[in-house]
Structure formats: structure tokens, C-alpha cells
Image (spheres, rainbow, N blue to C red):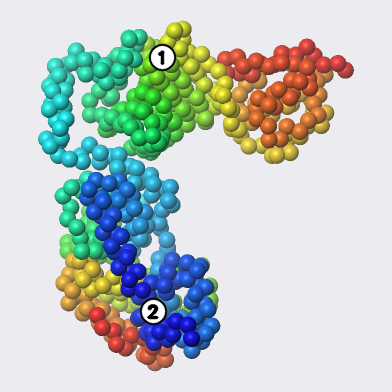
Amino acid sequence: MKNAHYRDYSVDDFTQDELFRDWVINRNSLSEVFWLEWLAENVDCTDKVQLARAFLLSLEEKDTGLSPMELEDIFTRIVQDSQPIVIPFWQRPTFRVAAAILLMLGMGYAAFTYVWKPNTGQLTHQAPASLDDISPALVSDVVDITNETTQPRTLILQDSSRIVLYPKGKLRYPKQFDKAKREVYLTGQAFFSVKRNPKKPFWVYTDQISTQVLGTSFLVTADASHAKVAVHSGRVSVYMRKDVQHEQKPGKHESAGVVLTPNQQVLFSTTEKRLVKSVVEKPIVIQKVPVNDYIFDEAPVTEVFTLLEKTYGLPVVYDASSLENCYLTANLTGESLFDKLNLICKITRSSYELVDGQIVIYSKGCEK
Amino acid sequence: MKTHVQTQASLDLLYWQQLQGGSELGLKKLIERYFNALQNYGYKFVRDEDFVKDCVQEVFIEIWSRRARVSTPESVRAYLLGSVRKRVLREGFRQRINRDDESTDLENDLTFVEFSPEWSVIEQESLAETTQRISDSLNQLPKRQREVIYLRYYQNLDRDEIAEIMGVNPQSVSNLLQAAFKTFRENWAGAVLLAAWLGDVTF
């Protein structure tokens, strides 16, 4: 008989046996198979086994455990938050440098610009509004994180916003957010999922542009000569750094910024010194629609455009009167936005252009 | 199966030492292995998931931030359980979640809640019935005896580990357990199955 030694087990022995516990406590199906087979061969032990099982189960509680994702978040936060206190600071090789910096900070504004600028590298030649004018919170008592690995790194801020910092990306955030706004400073590329809080707008500063959001997800890329913000969800406002101070004054209604909605992006080019709004390279579906909705049978093409607007969150601009007689019969299920547009335009003898983050349709009209 | 327990303990030790050396992986492994068990354990004292989650998290934060100075415990699992227990009780007391009596003695303020097994997972009726009977009997025990039973059987810890967690000497653990079984036996008088039980519990 297989595994005969279990026959001599007392209830107590069973409750301590790892294989038995694996079945009862961990609900491991392989262990379960083992024990059910064993029980079938040792029917006279059923009572003992059932008692041991019942005993362990009676001690069990509702499972209040967290998901692997939540555990990962907790791990990330612990590592990140306690980073500055790894080694007593006076033992660090950088202590003397740090002390020197502290001293210079003590000397005030001039010292600050001196310390800050070498940190942000060569990017400051445009002389946008200096950071301490815009955000005093990002000058003292901050955490600087640089992703020196080759993998994207996830950070979680104290307001639960998630930031994926891509390799070589640098992020600075205050140990404690300001009362009125949440502010971070970025060099490189990062994807932000900002926790919604209308009372405390979230600002991402880069050397050239600043992005304001209430709660949304978007990608920011900033290098020496370019900066780009692409929106996945929600609504964000992007400003040139020089306009930010002006923008943050209360009671101002006219905006110098650009408002972005999902699937739109804005580029800042150093040469043109302006913000250019466009559509992201690969627009994603913002709002799921039933699969069959993209099968059209003699549908007015304007209806098709309305559906596209809804699906991708991008405005479609067209002259309704010239499209009056255009009908579409096609199955566009599964195609990307641009493939859909190409097909529609081919069929309806029109063309499209992406202007200012919108889809503009030009049509010569269709024959009756 | 004893070897399995030993393997787990030596793995724990390995991760602990990695953590001491500053390895994030060591910390990560320990969180993956124990966070949920600790969370469930803390929940036995205070019925507030968020509160317990914060406590468990703080235990890990403290270990991680003091990693260069923390010593190597005899049993990592017992050390973690003990730390969570201490923190949950202390913080719970501070927040006046525990309002059992006026005593300021934490041990007496301990609210080791009653057992309430999850019925959904207990499929067989006879098994459910036995489970209910056992938990009824357990709930009649004084809470410290109940806690010893829980640590001994559900957590499968030995006497020294339980002593460390509860902050008492090992002999007290044995006494509590013996007392628990005495009461338990009386409650179960006449039950045929009792003979199959631990007539010879040695601890």
C-alpha cells in the first residue's frame, strides 16, 4: 500500500503535515488529488482526516490578502520612499559634495541656479522661466530619481499616482506635495497615470513645456531639443514654460496653452518655439463599441464619422452638405483608425488630413 | 515533510540576508511570501483591512530602512508575525480601536477575535458541521489560549516561535496549550472522535 505511514498519523500529525496543509490551507489541486486517492484506499482513516481538516478550517479567516499587483506597488513604494536613508549620510562618499551644495543653497537664489542648472544639463539655454519661480516646492526637500537601468521603472507617489520612468529618465518630486498643487520635474520619458484630484492639479514640468492635469494618463518625452506629450485618457493642458507663471495666476481666463484630449499629442520644437498639436501615431480605442457596429450596410458616411469620433475620442471635421449622398457598405471591424479612414476615403472618393489633432475630411461629393 | 519546512525556513533566511545586504530582491521575495499571511494574521486582531495593511507595510518599511543594522532572527516567519502583532496592537491601542476594558496593559487589551470560518469554501456538509462545532468550542476559550491554538495549528509554528511572537516564555506557551486542550476536551466530552485526537499532545 502506498504511503502507509500516514495510517499511523494522529489528527495532530495531519495538521502539521505540509502536504496535508497544502491541500486544506493552500487548496492546491495536486495535493488534493493525492489525498482523495489516499482516502479512497484508507477509508477507515476518513474520520481522522476530516477532523484534522475541520480543525484547520475552523481556524481559517476571510482572506484579506492583496493581489500581486498591489503587493508590487507596496514593494515599489517601500524601496522608493526609504531610498534616501539607506546609509547614514555622513558615511556616504557624496557627503562632502552634499554639504557643499547645502552651503550654496544657503546663499540663496544665485546659488540655486548654479546648482540646478548643471543638473538639468544643457537644456536650459532657452532660458524659460526658472524653476524656482514657478515651483518653489521643487527646489528644497526633493527626491531625485534617475532610472539607470535598462528597464522601465514604476514609481508611486504619495498621492498614489503611478509613473513609469523609462531608462535614462530623471524625475524630481517634492517629499511633500504643495497644498495647492502636485508638481514634478521630468527629463527624459515617462508615462503618467495621475490620480484624479481636481483640488490639486498635477503639473509636469520639463525644460521647455509644462503639462497640467487633474487626473489622467499620458506620456511625456523631453530631450534636449524636443518635448512631446501624448494623452491616453482624460484631458491635459500643455504650456510653454515661459507662459506657465502667467498661466498660474488666478482669475485668468484666456489660455496660452494647448488642451489635449485622448489620442492627441503636442510637440514642442526648439527651432519653431511653439506647440504643435497632432494625433498620436497609433490611436487607441477610447470607448469600446459593440463589434457589429463597424459593419456598415448603406450607412450614411456622416454616421460612420460620428462612430469614429466616439470610438477614438478625436474630432472629425467635415462639410456635411458635400457628404450628403455618400453611403458606405463595408466591414471595418478590427482595422486601425488610419486603415479605417483610408478605406472610407477610397470608397467615398474623399481624402483626409490630420490638422491640429483633428481629422479633417475633404470630399468632392458623391453621385446620387 | 519536515524537510519541506526546513527548506522554507532556509529560503527565508537567504532572502533575509540578501535584504540585509541591500538587495531589493530579498525584500521583494519576503513581501511576496509573507505579506498576505501577515495581513490575515493582523486582521485577527483588528477588523479593519486598511489599518492592518498599513501596519504590515510599516513593518516592512522599518526592516528595509534599518536593514544594515537589523539582526538575523532565529525564525524569519516568527519575527515577522511578532512584529506585525506588536504593531497592530500598539497602533490599534493608540487609535482606540481596542476598547475592551480600562486596563492599559496591552496584553489584556488584546482582541483576538472569534473564529468565523469561510463557509463558502467548505463544501461538504458533514465537514461544515464539524468545522462549526470546533470553532464554537474554540470560541469559548480565553483569547490567549485561542491565539496559541491558532499559531500552533494554523500557522504551524513551534513552541519557541510562538513564545517569541507572543512575548512570553516557552513554558507559558505549553501551559496555555495544555489548558486549551483541557477545556476543549471537556466541551467535546462524549465525542467518539476525541480518541483520535491528540491524547498524547507533547509540546
Q: Is residue A43 visible?
A: yes
Q: Residue at x 18, y 74 (%)?
A: B170
Q: Secondary structure at mark 2?
A: helix
CA–CA distance between discs 2 and 1? 69 Å
Closer mark to the observer between disc 2 and disc 1: 1
Q: Residue at x 33, y 42 (%)?
A: A77
* Residue A180 versus residue B131 in the image, above or below: above
* Residue B87 versus residue B156 in the image, above or below: above
Q: Are marks 2 and 1 in contact (CB under 8 Å)?
A: no
Outermost residue, front direction? Answer: A1
* Residue B119 versus residue B180 in the image, above or below: above
Q: Which residue is mark 1?
A: A225
Q: Nearer the viewer, residue A145 or B141?
A: A145
Rendering coords of residue A90 (x, y %): 11, 35
Q: Which residue is mark 2?
A: A14
Instruction: Count how many numbered circles sit on residues in the image.
Output: 2
